[in-house]
Image (cartoon, coloured by chain):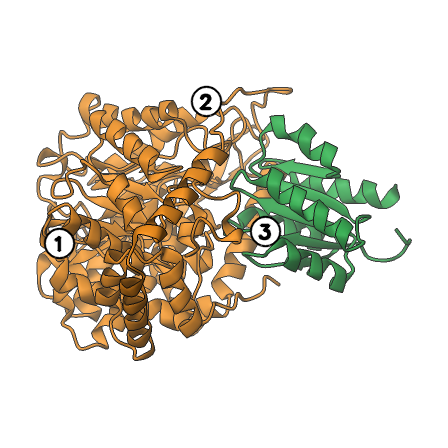
Chain colours: A orange, B green
């Protein structure tokens, strides 16, 4: 929420500006600043589509293709989700981004007592392949890609995506799924973890290894700086953690004997765009550059297209406020502008009412329209990286790069990202920073319109609330019971037994999961096996 | 509440939701304000939360709920603390709570309700006032 610290004199004149990542901002910039930071056109910038890709990964940017809009959608039953998907596609949305309910994210079936009151609440409930059959009915899986916001059980959902594609006659080789599948960030923020770090990382390695041959158009991992930023990270920390986490997943697959060029091109990133706009632009540009350099220098990646930082720059949840919620529509438009100025390939925007409720169709549509206005009305497709060459932007992009590297160094000193997360160092740091931000807002050191300036006392905002539907939860449970009555118990128990053996033997579990899905084994049954074999993550303490 | 004893507060995350920025920030703020704070960690059942409350003999039980399920979850907590004979503990709730649900939570007996955006000072004052009461 904080955009920067402003040091002012008694007449409100700004004497210093310090960005969250620690960069001091000058009143103006000139070629001397570029000299000071050692800027070189060839080394630091280069043409669009050229290494180090600071200016973007395509030579023609949005001229060749506008960004993909991928609003986060999914609630209630798979039937309701299917209807919402079709609505958003009919309004011009170009990718899907599936939200799952918490029982599904945590690997419980809808009829599990622990799921009571949560079935279909924050996303779609998925128990068996039957639910995917309903959710993706009449969706062209060969034409439209699907983000699957799932982590601890991403392997299961990816297997189910393959199973549904095959059921509808699509070759797995042509479908494109992007499961989030980033467990380390779940342990830092968001909290939808189940298994301990080591087996959780192994499952991610399995999905990457499997996708290489069976689903080569799938992007098996979407590394999320996003939620780390939401948890209290600075922009520099967001990128530092994201790169280090991606490296941890890379190392898992390399240890299996693969060549990095065979898989790393399918890594994608999910990064956040709230905050000071210049700092975010510098962040995205520096991130593309550092990711490319990391792959080239540390991992000796050969193919240029494997050096691209592909990703979704979007969301902005923490920047939005509960107070005066209509202001969030404007904030979202500015955040989206930042993403467009930074060359985001894919974007999505939190809806203005999300501090209150699951977005209504109306508010989700406003977000989509915000993204479309930028591309179709405002000229964002005209030229690539329009801010390039600005003394200011190029200077702070270099400075941001240094800050990110400093943050990476700090994590390495803690023993690396896996250890730092396992032991809770990152989590405690994020909590402490989040607390400092709240204090800054209370003291007025940080400004937020409608929150601590320009408040409207006694305001009451009428936001249409998304109602929890007990009947649709009941229908979901009924549906699950029906599937259990109809399926072959023999097939289910055989495929589950095979899965258990494969899990215990340390084999790649993906083909076994696909068989389980096809036999209509439930998410809870498959996760149950992992829970038994792997155990659960022991969350480190807060203090 | 006995004078001189440090206020002891349990901040709990019930259910399957893992969004804990709010819970962690409140925990740190209360700790800085001189209270003894127990943070439950994520994915706790109501039974686990009530057991922690009994073992730690806390004065307050706080629930942080972001999914919209605050009504059924809080109901279950009250049922359980009464069953276990600690119905006298003060309960407070924070999270994504629309204003129309505030009367319902009050009726259930929730002593403090802190929707997202509540100033930290207001939350700390709640404990100070409750202690003086």
Q: Which numbered circle lies on residue A172?
A: 1
Quadrant of the rendered structure where residue A261 is?
bottom left
A488 displayed left or right of A274: left
Chain letter, disc 1 residue: A
Q: Position of residue A388 (x, y in %)?
A: 20, 40
Image vertical order of residue A503 relative to residue A441, above or below: below
Please say whether residue A275 is visible from this viewpoint.
no
Q: CA distance from mark 2 to mark 3?
A: 31 Å
Chain letter, disc 2 residue: A
The residue lying at 82 percent from left, 40 percent from top is B129
The front one of A451 and A161 is A161
The residue lying at 49 percent from left, 25 percent from top is A325
Quadrant of the rendered structure where residue A403 is?
bottom left
Nearer to us: label 2 or label 3: 3
A514 displayed left or right of B43: left
Q: Position of residue B107 (x, y in %)?
A: 73, 32
Q: Which numbered circle lies on residue B14?
A: 3
Nearer to us: label 2 or label 1: 1
């Amino acid at each position: 929420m904080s955009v920067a610290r402003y040091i002012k004199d008694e007449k409100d004149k700004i004497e210093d500006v310090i960005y969250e990542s620690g960069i001091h901002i000058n009143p103006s910039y000139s070629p001397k600043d570029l000299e000071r930071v050692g800027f070189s056109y060839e080394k630091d910038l280069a043409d669009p589509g050229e290494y180090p890709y600071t200016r973007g990964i395509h030579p023609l940017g949005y001229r060749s293709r506008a960004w993909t809009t991928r609003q986060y959608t999914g609630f209630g039953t798979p039937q309701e989700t299917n209807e919402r998907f079709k609505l958003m596609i009919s309004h011009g949305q170009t990718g899907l981004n599936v939200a799952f309910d918490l029982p599904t994210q945590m690997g419980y079936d809808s009829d599990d007592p622990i799921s009571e009151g949560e079935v279909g609440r924050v996303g779609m409930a998925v128990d068996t392949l039957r639910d995917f059959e309903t959710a993706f009915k009449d969706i062209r899986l060969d034409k439209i890609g699907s983000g699957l916001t799932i982590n601890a059980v991403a392997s299961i959902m990816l297997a189910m995506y393959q199973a549904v594609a095959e059921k509808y006659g699509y070759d797995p080789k042509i479908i494109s799924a992007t499961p989030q599948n980033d467990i380390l960030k779940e342990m830092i923020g968001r909290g939808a973890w189940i298994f301990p770090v080591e087996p959780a990382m192994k499952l991610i390695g399995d999905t990457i290894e499997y996708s290489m041959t069976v689903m080569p158009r799938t992007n098996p991992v979407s590394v999320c700086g996003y939620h780390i930023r939401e948890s209290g990270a600075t922009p520099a920390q967001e990128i530092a953690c994201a790169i280090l986490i991606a490296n941890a997943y890379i190392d898992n697959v390399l240890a299996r004997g693969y060549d990095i060029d065979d898989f790393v091109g399918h890594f994608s990133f999910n990064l956040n765009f709230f905050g000071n706009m210049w700092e975010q632009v510098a962040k995205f540009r520096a991130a593309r550059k550092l990711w490319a350099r990391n792959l080239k220098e540390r991992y000796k990646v050969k193919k240029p297209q494997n050096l691209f930082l592909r990703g979704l720059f979007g969301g902005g949840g923490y920047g939005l406020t509960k107070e005066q919620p209509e202001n969030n529509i404007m904030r979202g438009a500015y955040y989206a502008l930042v993403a467009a100025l930074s060359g985001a390939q894919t974007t999505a925007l939190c809806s203005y009412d999300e501090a209150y409720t699951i977005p209504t169709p109306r508010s989700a549509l406003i977000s989509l329209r915000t993204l479309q206005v930028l591309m179709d009305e405002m000229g964002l497709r005209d030229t690539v990286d329009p801010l390039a060459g600005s003394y200011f932007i190029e200077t702070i992009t270099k400075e941001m790069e240094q800050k990110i590297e400093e943050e990476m160094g700090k994590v390495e000193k803690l023993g690396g990202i896996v250890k730092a997360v396992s032991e809770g160092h990152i989590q405690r740091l994020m909590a402490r920073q989040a607390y400092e931000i709240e204090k800054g807002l209370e003291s007025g050191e940080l400004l937020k319109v409608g929150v601590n300036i320009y408040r409207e006392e006694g305001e009451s905002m009428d936001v249409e609330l998304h109602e929890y539907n007990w009947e649709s939860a009941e229908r979901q449970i009924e549906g699950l019971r029906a599937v259990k009555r109809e399926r072959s118990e023999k097939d289910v128990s055989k495929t589950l037994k095979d899965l258990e053996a494969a899990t215990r033997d340390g084999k790649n579990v993906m083909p076994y999961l696909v068989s389980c899905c096809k036999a209509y084994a439930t998410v809870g049954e498959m996760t149950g096996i992992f829970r038994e074999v792997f155990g659960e993550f022991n969350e480190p303490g807060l203090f | 509440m006995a004078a001189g004893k440090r206020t002891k507060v349990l901040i709990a995350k019930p259910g399957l939701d893992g969004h804990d920025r709010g819970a962690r920030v409140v925990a740190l703020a209360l700790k800085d304000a001189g209270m003894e704070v127990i943070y439950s960690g994520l994915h706790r059942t109501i039974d686990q939360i009530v057991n922690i409350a009994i073992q730690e003999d806390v004065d307050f039980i706080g629930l942080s709920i972001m999914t919209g399920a605050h009504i059924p979850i809080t109901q279950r907590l009250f049922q359980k603390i009464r069953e276990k004979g600690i119905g006298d503990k003060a309960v407070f709730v924070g999270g994504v709570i629309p204003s129309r649900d505030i009367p319902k939570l009050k009726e259930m007996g929730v002593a403090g309700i802190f929707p997202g955006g509540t100033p930290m000072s207001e939350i700390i004052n709640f404990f100070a006032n409750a202690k003086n009461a």
